């Protein structure tokens, strides 16, 4: 009986709402991204993005309506390019 409950519980966990994410080259074309799309592009966890918003750090964002968070694609690209590391300089 306990095994049946465990199987039912695992089925419920697997049936949680999953977010379908388009490929990154299509996401960049969108003017605004949600936090799941941003996480797919940047490789950061959604929880990290949420924590950075709470701490008032990280990427600039827009709050649409009461709870909907959006990031401008232009801001995302600028943020990522601003942290570029290059090895053009030779070490002496």
Image (tube, helix red, strand yellow):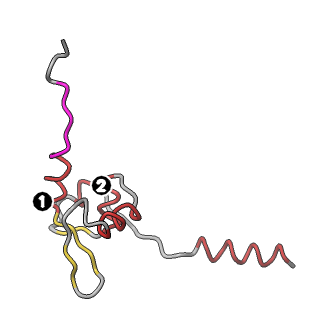
Q: Which secondary structure type mostly characterizes the magenta part of the structure?
A: loop
47 relative to 92, above or below: below
89 relative to 79, above or below: above
Quadrant of the frame with the C terminus: top left
Pointer 1 local density, CA inside 10 Å: few below 14, some 14–19, many at least 20: few
- If you read the primary sequence from the N terminus, does the residue marked by circle 1 or circle 2 appear first? 2
Furthest toward the top, the residue is 92
79 relative to 87, above or below: below
Relative to residue 59, is residue 18 drawn left or right? right
- Disc 2 target residue: 41
Q: Which label sits on residue 8?
A: none
Relative to residue 45, is residue 15 drawn left or right? right
Relative to residue 1, is residue 13 drawn left or right? left
Q: Position of residue 6 (x, y in %)?
A: 76, 73
Which residue is depicted at the point 19% across and 40% down? 84
> How far apart are the two marked residues, 1 and 2, measured between alpha carbons?
13 Å
Q: Nearer the viewer, residue 57 or 66?
A: 57
Which residue is depicted at the point 23% across and 59% down? 26
* SS category of the residue bearing label 1: helix
| Number of numbered markers | 2
- Disc 1 target residue: 74
Q: Position of residue 90 (x, y in %)?
A: 16, 16
Pointer 2 local density, CA inside 10 Å: few below 14, some 14–19, many at least 20: some
Is label 1 in contact with label 2 (beta carbons under 8 Å)? no
Q: Nearer the viewer, residue 36 or 58?
A: 58
42 in the magenta segment: no
Q: Position of residue 42 (x, y in %)?
A: 30, 53
Give residue 39's quadrant in the image.
bottom left
Which residue is depicted at the point 23% across and 54% down? 25
For the record, the magenta segment spans 82-87
């Amino acid at each position: 009986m306990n095994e049946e409950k465990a199987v039912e519980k695992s089925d419920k966990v697997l049936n949680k709402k999953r977010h379908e994410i388009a490929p990154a080259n299509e996401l960049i074309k969108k003017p605004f991204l949600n936090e799941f799309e941003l996480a797919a592009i940047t490789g950061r966890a959604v929880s990290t993005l949420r924590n950075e918003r709470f701490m008032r750090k990280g990427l600039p964002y827009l709050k649409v309506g009461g709870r909907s968070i959006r990031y401008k694609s232009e801001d995302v690209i600028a943020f990522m390019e601003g942290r570029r590391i290059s090895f053009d300089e030779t070490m002496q």
